[in-house]
Amino acid sequence: MSENNKSKKSGGNMGRSGGPMGSFASGPVVKAKDFKGTLKRLVGYLKPQRTNFILVFIFAIISTIFTIVGPKISAKAIDKLVEGIMNKYTLIGLHAQQEKIATLVKANPAAAKSPKVVAGLAQIKAGISKVMNVNSGKIDFTYILNIIVLLIGLYLVSTIFGFLQQYIMAGVAQKTVYNLRRDVDEKLSRLPLKFFDARTHGEILSRVTNDVDNISTTLQQSLTQLITSFVTIVGIIVMMLTISPIMTLVVILTLPLYIFVTAFVAKRSQKYFAAQQKEIGEINGHVEEMYTGHKIVKSFGHEKDSIQVFRNINDRLYVAGWKAQFISGIIMPLMRFVSNLGYVVVCIVGGLLATQGKVSIGDIQAFIQYSNQFTQPIVQTANIANIIQSTVASAERIFELLDEVEELPESVDGKLIEFPKGEVKFENVDFSYKTEEPLIKNMNIDVKQGHTIAIVGPTGAGKTTLVNLLMRFYEIDAGKITVDGVDIRDMKRAQLRNMFGMVLQDTWLYNGTIMENIAYGRKGATEEETMQAARAAHAHHFIKTLPDGYNTILNEEASNISQGQKQLLTIARAILANPTIMILDEATSSVDSRTEVYIQRAMSELMQNRTSFVIAHRLSTIKDAELILVMNKGSIIEMGNHDELIAKKGFYEDLYNSQFSGANLDNEVV
Ligand SMILES: Nc1ncnc2c1ncn2[C@@H]1O[C@H](COP(=O)(O)OP(=O)(O)O)[C@@H](O)[C@H]1O
Ligand SMILES: [Mg+2]
């Protein structure tokens, strides 16, 4: 996996790490090259879900509004409570005055008539009746209860709408990424091998999984959060303004402080997060290298060095990680400090206004609640901005893949060879993997039905390339290749490839039973047929010795059977497929000599009565071939059967003399 790929991979999910303050605390965000264009295209993917989207929007707005009005309504209850308590104390005061006057009058009855006393009593009476008019001077618990019920109702409605919103959004997000994933997968199957040659598996995997995942999470979480945050910010400002424009101003004035603090911390922490990311990449690379090459490291006695390298990287990772986490951890307390500063100022201003009777106690408590709720959506929105950037970058990588040039389209009326014979012709074929480096030039081959063609030549001569062209894994630049006289470009790829069976040096087996792996060669093969093929491939015997026989499950790397046994299975698979033309590319290269004998026999079985292309080491195979192609540097330099080529005293004879000298006829040619 390349370094470049590593950083891309981790870039996919960046902005989500680092806890609640994600974006401020995480590493640099990978940005899209064409943000607008990509965003537009992404929106295009959401279009089929338009109605659902609008519903999500509306529900999010309703849900948020119902939450936001809460404090303002609870203010009413508090005001009522305060009023009730005040009334109670006013009443007590008035009664006390009344009694004082009464005792005065008792001691001095004449004073009862004095205008001052009369007026005073009247005033007190008026006061009492005024207080009594308000809910008989008691705390209005019914009113408060009603408010509480109302509040519960509001929050309930808010929750229900919030729930609905999430429910619909889950569908929208999953459906969208489902389509995206399907498109990517279908695209991958239409891409030429050239595309895969230029990329690592990890890079391709990362697009199908990480990048799609990133989009899914953003749709699911961040988008609704963005809507909610936006509505919350606007709603809170409106509510605060209705309470007190001056206090609102105070809160808004603290905002630059937040921005300053976050920018201050973000700048410092990003550096360390980037360092942390880099060290993580290195440690992954090192571990991957050391454990895929576990045996080699051990056999060369490099464990100590390997451990030392690991320690060094780990030490650097520790420092970078520690600093990154510490600095990003500072942000929360700092934010709380700023928030508390604002809180104090709001309280002072609120208190002053309250003493002037400009705001009620309930309103002040509502206001404090609002100002507390204010910072969260702002921080969230800033976070989401980063997340959206990394999401659009992910989308861009996916769209890049979707825009790759595809294989030439299938010919419309694919010619079908009903009874294929297996005559193959190359006519003036030119080919290059890279346009600037021509490899095969003007190649001509004529292969008769049932013949065995051996291809020999040094590594890199173009032997495998020849096979690739025959199977149409790559498109030729000039000339034509025909099978039974039909240009392979006039056939459907699947039909063409159906005519071929392949056994390669790298065996490909998948996680499944041996039975399933062999049966892969032909759809709908019965167990009997499968076992028959295994017998023909000389694999039956070893399979039977396994504890679970044909039901033995091959693990991911099929490391529970030997390389040679794997090869026997792929040969059995090819025999079962019963192809017209067989291709054996260095099938015995990485096999022990005992198994090789079996493979040799199995291969002869396989090559009987069908056209076969064999890229092999074994002289026995080469000697019996009807045609030997000697290749070097992309060209066929000699052609003929063994005796003809020896008589020619050319490259082949040289090769023969240098490598099969003496009685050692089983030596290697390649
Ligand atoms: N997928 C590819 N992309 C680019 N160049 C390739 C690719 N495969 C092979 N080559 C190059 O083409 C030449 C022939 O390779 P190949 O046919 O695999 O040789 P052989 O099988 O005879 O060892 C080599 O120089 C090799 O580096
Ligand atoms: Mg090869």
Image (spheres, helix red, strand yellow):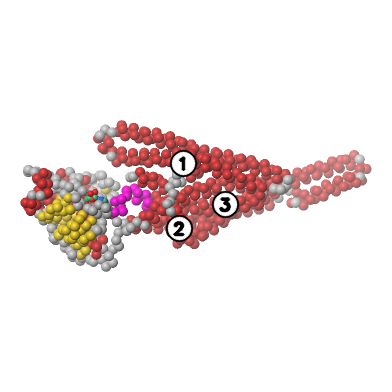
> Which residue is under mark 3?
232
- Measuring 16% from the left and 51% from the top, which residue is drawn there? 631
Q: Are marks 3 and 2 in contact (CB under 8 Å)?
A: no
Residue range corresponding to the magenta coloring: 194-209
Residue 630 relative to residue 42: left or right: left
Label located before the other in sequence (2 or 1): 2
Q: Amino acid at mark 2?
A: Lys
Q: Is residue 552 magenta?
A: no
Is 642 drawn above or below residue 300 in the view shown? below
Residue at the extreme right of the image, as rendered: 110
Dot 3, how many residues are within 10 Å of its Cα: few (below 14), some (14-19), or many (20+)?
many
Of residue 171 and residue 650, the one placed in the foreground of this image is 650
Dot 1, how many residues are within 10 Å of its Cα: few (below 14), some (14-19), or many (20+)?
many
For the residue labelled by badge 1, is the local secondary structure a helix, a strand or a loop? Answer: helix
Q: Position of residue 172 (x, y in %)?
A: 46, 57
Label located before the other in sequence (3 or 2): 2
Q: Position of residue 311 (x, y in %)?
A: 36, 33
For the residue labelled by badge 3, is the local secondary structure a helix, a strand or a loop? Answer: helix
> Which residue is under mark 1?
270
- Measuring 51% from the left and 57% from the top, which residue is drawn there? 56
Of residue 486 and residue 98, the one placed in the foreground of this image is 486
The residues tagged by marks 3 and 1 sit, at their Cα atoms, a distance apart of 29 Å
Is 663 drawn above or below residue 502 in the view shown? above
> Which residue is under mark 2?
40
Give the quadrant of residue 312. top left
Residue 183 relative to residue 568: left or right: right
Camera-nearest label, 3 or 2: 2
For the residue labelled by badge 2, is the local secondary structure a helix, a strand or a loop? Answer: helix
Residue 614 relative to residue 209: left or right: left
Magenta region, mostly helix, strand or loop? helix
